[in-house]
């Protein structure tokens, strides 16, 4: 359990900083992507905001378990292993989720593509952390 929790917490902190820093930069440099978010569909009750902000830790915990279970399949140095981990997760989990999301909600393809890219970046960063902390 220690091999899952410790790397998950480390990755969670790093993902929190990278994710929200990246979001800030994206809004500054590509505001046109965020106009669609001015929609009641994306407005939550303030009591649920903690769920949004804890996302980095939830995904890190899930990815840490996935890493511990399948890390023996990833070969090479930690960069290659981290990249491969992120790509595998993206193909297995993100593509199907983005497919159903795009097909069932009134959102743009660019929005879904940005969510996919965001998830891919999170998975690669987490994979790099896990490959370094829990080889």
Image (tube, grey):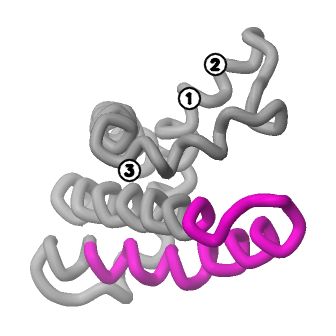
Circles 1 and 2, Cβ within 8 Å, touching? The answer is yes
Residue bearing the label numbered 1: 54
When the figure is inspected, residue 10 is found, relative to residue 126, above or below; the finding is above
Label 2: element kind:
helix
Disc 2 from disc 3: Cα separation: 26 Å
The answer to whether residue 68 is seen in the rendering is: no
Residue matched to label 3 = 3
**In this orientation, does residue 39 appear?**
yes
First of labels 2, 3 by sequence position? 3
User: Who is closer to the viewer here, 96 or 133?
Assistant: 96
Instruction: Give the residues in magenta.
Output: 83-112
In front: 115, or 88? 115
Secondary structure state at the residue bearing disc 1: loop
Residue at position x 47%, y 48% from top? 32
For the point 51% across and 76% down, the residue is 90
| Residue at far top of view | 47
Label 2 neighbour load within 10 Å: few <14, some 14-19, many 20+: few
Which quadrant of the rendered structure holds the C terminus?
bottom left
Residue 96 sits in which quadrant? Answer: bottom right
The residue that label 2 is drawn on is: 50
Q: Position of residue 8 (x, y in %)?
A: 41, 44
Q: Which residue shows up at 56% across the image and 29% down it? A: 54
What is the secondary structure assignment of the residue under circle 3? helix
Give how far across and how far down residue 71 sits, in percent: 37, 76
């Amino acid at each position: 359990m220690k091999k899952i929790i410790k790397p998950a917490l480390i990755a969670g902190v790093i993902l929190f900083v990278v994710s929200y820093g990246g979001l800030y930069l994206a809004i500054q440099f590509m505001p046109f992507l965020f106009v669609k978010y001015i929609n009641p569909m994306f407005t939550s009750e303030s009591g649920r905001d903690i769920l949004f902000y804890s996302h980095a830790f939830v995904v890190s915990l899930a990815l840490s378990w996935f890493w511990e279970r399948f890390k023996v399949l990833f070969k090479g140095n930690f960069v290659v292993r981290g990249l491969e981990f992120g790509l595998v997760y993206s193909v297995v989990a993100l593509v199907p989720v983005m497919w159903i999301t795009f097909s069932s909600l009134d959102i743009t393809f660019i929005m879904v593509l940005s969510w996919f890219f965001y998830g891919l970046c999170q998975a690669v960063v987490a994979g790099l952390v896990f490959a370094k902390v829990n080889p």
